[in-house]
Amino acid sequence: MTYTLDIPFQMIDPDGASTGAELPNLTDAELRELFVHMQRVRTVDARMLKLQRAGRVGFVGSTVGQEASMIGTAAPLRVTDWLWSGLREGGAALMRGLPLGEYIAQMYCNAHDTAKGRQMCNHFQHKGSNYPSWSSVIGTQIPHGVGAAFAAKKQGKDEVHTIYFGDGATSSNGFHSGMTFAAVWKAPAVFVCIHNGWAISVPSAAQTAVARWTDKGIAYGVPAAEVDGNDVLACYNAMQVALERARAGEGPTLLIVKTYRMMGHSSSDDPTVYRTAAEVDPWTKRDPLTRFAKFLESRGILAEGEAAGIERELTEETDSEIHKQEAAPGMPLRSLVEDVYSEVPRHLMSQYNSFIETAERHGEAQKGDGAFPL
Ligand SMILES: Cc1ncc(C[n+]2csc(CCOP(=O)(O)OP(=O)(O)O)c2C)c(N)n1
Ligand SMILES: [Mg+2]
């Protein structure tokens, strides 16, 4: 058995021209839609970073440069499939049905936040599209996703579990145990390693001594392929192959999706401390949105200037949701003691009561916070 799958690395070159590889079977409308999804990711991301800089939301992990890697790989999933996110796939959840308002509510941790303020902001979840809540603890979603994939197989469910993680996460225990079990059980799982060059300040070359990242699959018996993560169609095509393998009972696939993290690790990071402009600049020329827009324009699917119009519309849509979510009330303080015990125990009642007294004194309690019969 060969462990390297024969999948084209690239389908569109950085100038937007076809490389000659057979393209996925998508209509013009579907191709245009892929562009809109990528642009939404970038637009929302830019707005969130501005809000963070203005002190209105707490934390943002930017995905600039990685739009094709998440949209291209997530687009061929069925609604019944699952997406276990790493640190940056919120945009894929938006494409799969997470309402933009809910996304932004999570950033504000307000009363509409489905995580009830119990997550750090910028850690999304969406039950409706099989998108479990993120964990910042690197690699933990890998065995979770594999376990869920195995359970689906045992229950005879026709669903694939796609498990996203970064290059840094391949050094985690979760990667080792997840890959081992998925391969032995032939679980219907796809491992999507978004290889963006960095794990905070650690370059990917310091994560492994293997010459080819796809070799990471061999030890586990997991076939692998590397694709250009800035080429949305190459990502789409590779994912289709991996999903088909999983659905056919052939077990897991490892996709190494090669892209680049253009911004800092997060809004708390300054990447100029550990990398040079000479390293970053060439990646600007490989921008996934510019590349795909050129491709679509050359085929008459996008008119010249249309991309700018799409961006304007998405910005307006995003701003309108931001205004709504900013105006929303905060999470009621009483949610602090809800959902764990069927009846709030005496020691928590007494802590909550003294907490509310302090919050009221500081004018920080809202109507209803103190209404608990505690
Ligand atoms: C178990 C664990 N160790 C360390 C960290 C601190 N940490 C947060 S993100 C990160 C790097 C992740 O890099 P990568 O997996 O490549 O994902 P990327 O941030 O590039 O998307 C680290 C080390 C953590 N969150 N969890
Ligand atoms: Mg990384």
Image: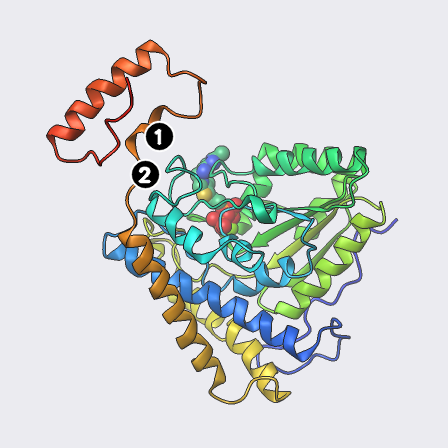
In this rendering, does residue 212 appear at all?
Answer: no
**Image position of 131 with respect to 49: above or below:** above
From the viewer's side, name the closer residue of 40 and 261.
40
Instruction: Name the spot of residue 357 as percent of width and height, x first.
Output: 16, 23
Q: Position of residue 125 (x, y in %)?
A: 50, 44
Name the mark on residue 335. Answer: 1
Q: Is residue 207 above or below residue 62?
A: above
Residue type at numbered disc 1: Ser
Q: Give the quadrant of residue 45.
A: bottom left
Given the current orientation, which residue lies at the most extreme left position?
Answer: 361
**Counting other residues with Cα less than 10 Å from the Cα at mark 1, is it few (<14), some (14-19), or many (20 or more)?**
few
Picture quarter containing residue 131? top right
Query: SS class of the residue under badge 1?
Result: helix
Image point (68%, 35%), residue name:
148
Residue sitting at 74 percent across and 33 percent down? 151
Q: How far is disc 1 from disc 2 in space, using C-alphas?
A: 7 Å
On screen, residue 169 above or below 214:
above
Kindly tell me whether mark 1's CB lies below 8 Å from ligand 1: no
Q: Quadrant of the C terminus?
A: top left
Q: Position of residue 2 (x, y in %)?
A: 85, 51
Three-letter amino acid code at the position of disc 2 = Met
- Residue at image position (74%, 60%) is 240
Residue under pointer 2 = 331
Q: Is residue 347 left or right of residue 137?
A: left
For residue 156, side relative to residue 239 (left or right): right
Q: Is residue 119 left or right of residue 154?
A: left
Total numbered labels: 2
Colour scheme in use: rainbow
Whether residues under marks 1 and 2 lie with C-beta atoms below 8 angstroms apart, the answer is yes
The image shows residue 14 at horizontal and vertical percentages of 58, 77
Which residue is at the front of the view, 117 or 339? 339
